[in-house]
């Protein structure tokens, strides 16, 4: 593990705190149980699993949340065009 990937760099959250952070910072409602399921099935934010409790780094939560939200648009037609381009 490189120093850049070390959990000591930046703020790390346990699952309950990560859930709260996503709600407060991005208005995304993911319960700790949902984050636990995503940790098993995939598709959730990245986390460190070296201890008894998974730790979610803030930059990983930010990256995952912004990917979920998508880009800023000016109209619904622009949003639709972006979605169609992404699907193609």
Image (cartoon, rainbow, N blue to C red):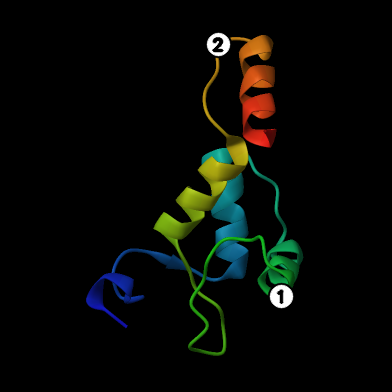
Q: Considering the numbered disc 1 on the image, is that residue within a helix, a strand or a loop?
A: helix
| Residue 1 spot, x, y in % from top left | 32, 83
Q: CA distance from mark 2 to mark 1?
A: 36 Å
In which quadrant of the rendered view does residue 42 lie? Answer: bottom right
What residue is shown at x 56% (from left), y 62% (from top)?
A: 17
Labels 2 & 1 near each other (Cβ < 8 A)? no
In which quadrant of the rendered view does residue 31 lie? Answer: bottom right
User: Foreground residue, 7 or 42?
Assistant: 42
| Residue 6 spot, x, y in % from top left | 32, 76
Q: Is residue 7 left or right of residue 40?
A: left
User: Foreground residue, 14 or 45?
Assistant: 45
10 Å neighbourhood of mark 2: few (<14), some, or many (≥20)? few
Quarter of the figure that contains the C terminus = top right
What residue is shown at x 61% (from left), y 14% (from top)?
A: 78
10 Å neighbourhood of mark 1: few (<14), some, or many (≥20)? few
Question: Which label number is shown at residue 2?
Answer: none
Q: Is residue 48 left or right of residue 4?
A: right
User: Foreground residue, 65 or 26?
Assistant: 65
* Mark sitting earlier along the chain (2/1): 1
Residue at the extreme front: 88
> As displayed, is residue 69 above or below residue 65?
above
> As displayed, is residue 30 above or below residue 35?
above
Residue annotated with mark 1: 40
User: Foreground residue, 40 or 33?
Assistant: 40
Residue annotated with mark 2: 74
| Residue 47 spot, x, y in % from top left | 51, 71
What residue is shown at x 55% (from left), y 17% (from top)?
A: 73
Residue at the extreme left: 3
> As displayed, is residue 32 above or below residue 24?
below
| Residue 66 spot, x, y in % from top left | 52, 41
What residue is shown at x 62% (from left), y 65% (from top)?
A: 16
Q: Considering the numbered disc 2 on the image, is that residue within a helix, a strand or a loop?
A: loop
């Amino acid at each position: 593990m490189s120093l850049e990937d070390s959990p000591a760099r930046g703020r790390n959250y346990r699952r309950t705190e990560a859930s709260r952070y996503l709600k407060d910072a991005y208005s995304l409602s993911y319960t700790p149980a949902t984050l636990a399921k995503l940790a098993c099935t995939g598709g959730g934010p990245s986390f460190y699993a070296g201890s008894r409790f998974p730790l979610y780094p803030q930059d990983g939560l930010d990256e995952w949340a912004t990917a979920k939200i998508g880009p800023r648009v000016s109209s619904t037609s622009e949003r639709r065009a972006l979605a169609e381009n992404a699907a193609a």
